[in-house]
Image (cartoon, helix red, strand yellow):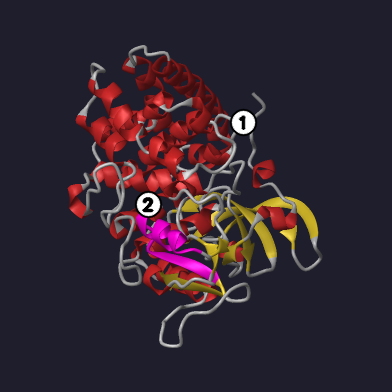
Amino acid sequence: MIKKVKKQDLRLGMFIHDLNCGWMDHSFLRNSFMLRREADLEKIARSGITEVYIDTLKGIDVLDDVVAPTREQVVQEVQEKILHSPVAAAPAPAPARTSHQEEMVFAKEIQKEANKVIHSVLEDVRLGKQIKVERVEPVVSQITESILRNPGTLVSLCRIREGDTYTFQHSVSVATLLISFCRAMDLPADVIHEAGIGGMLHDIGKMRVPDHILNKPGKLTEAEFAVMKKHVDLGLEVLHKTPGISETVIQVAGEHHEKFCGTGYPLRKKGQEISLLGRMAAIVDVYDAITSNRIYHKGMEPPTALRKIYEWSDSSTTAEPHMDEELVQHFIHALGIYPVASLVRLESEQLAVILEQSREGLLTPRVRVVYDCRRRVQVDPFDLDLAAPGAQGDGIVGNEDPDDWKLNPYDYMDLPQL
């Protein structure tokens, strides 16, 4: 049985099933292992980890007087809180001005150009050259315009990665997600623009990290992890020497690894000590990291990642929330409980891909039905608006892992060939 356990209740002989944090938040070589040494308990405490999941079938259980909910109980509780939160009934932030299919053509081209620009900029940083902000600004404007036309299309492309260029594509994804988040928060246009630049440049310090650490095809050692964490300060050094860099950009780059509970880095800021944009960037950075496929771990499906982020921020159940709970709810509102390109199961026992959020509420998006679970066969895809009377009462039961069904949602997303 998988149970959630507070760090103070851990004992030697327990089997860690999941460290319950992002892969870049700890330096353990594995995410699951047997607790055999006191040094491991001390390492967990140093990592700022507050709760983990244990497997009682592979190791000892908690003491009788310790409260330890099962994983199923935690997932159910988090899901219920999200479904009954104000964001569930709220409409999508704004109606789409272009269709998903129309915007996909522009979005794919914008993503391609953004990846090209950030690759060039980060290579300049690696070579010790000065950043030219004017090269970043046009692509940030294009990302913003795409999101204003159709909020979900470009965001849905963030998970499509080509080759081993995580740092470059992560920068574009963080910028895209942060712009979408800012827009949903109704922040001023100039702030949204600067936040986008901050997202593009938030990890530039990694270009000053030794290649053997930055590009290591596996987990970092504790010593290597300490070096990697210096990328924030290294990035700030570059930005402070760059003409035209705003305070908003500095906040995004300098605070995206701070945690609401004060256990983040580099300054261990806490709560409102972290700027609004810093708190928002921290949410976006974690979301993109845990939904990304890496050599050493498979990314979470977006709805699962949103539940995990909500769990990590829930002040009613977590002693040390990593993120601002209210902002996490706004982030879920921006993306949708089931973000675009998610695979979901319907009450009709069909599988569908989310195409677009609905102004009627985040539980009634427009979907594309692709699979019949009863007959276990793919069907000729057809679109269904769950908010329309014609949906005949059909609704979403939950999300599914596409790998379990050997389906790729992007095969049904009208991706253009560029």
Residue 36 lies, in percent from the top left, at: 53, 65
Residue situated furthest bottom in the rendering: 64
- Point out the image quarter for the C terminus: top right
Compute the Cα span from label 2 to label 1: 26 Å
Residue 237 lies, in percent from the top left, at: 27, 24
Give the label on residue 308, or none: none
295 sits to left or right of 199: right
Residue situated furthest left in the rendering: 273
Give the residue type that dot 2 points to: Phe
Residue bearing the label numbered 1: 162
399 is within the stretch colored magenta = no
Residue lying at 60% horizontally and 63% vertically, measured from the top left: 391
Helix, strand or loop under label 1: loop
Residue lying at 62% horizontally and 72% vertically, measured from the top left: 58
51 is within the stretch colored magenta = yes
356 sits to left or right of 151: right
Give the residue type that dot 1 points to: Glu
Helix, strand or loop under label 2: helix
Residue 276 lies, in percent from the top left, at: 23, 45
Q: Which residues are magenta?
A: 37-54
* Residue 360 showing in the rendered view: no
Q: Does residue 346 lie above or below 219 as drawn? A: below
**Toward the viewer: 386 or 256?**
256
Identify the image quadrant of residue 8. Answer: bottom left
Q: Does residue 294 lie above or below 271 as drawn? A: above
* Disc nearer the start of the sequence (2/1): 1
Residue bearing the label numbered 2: 331
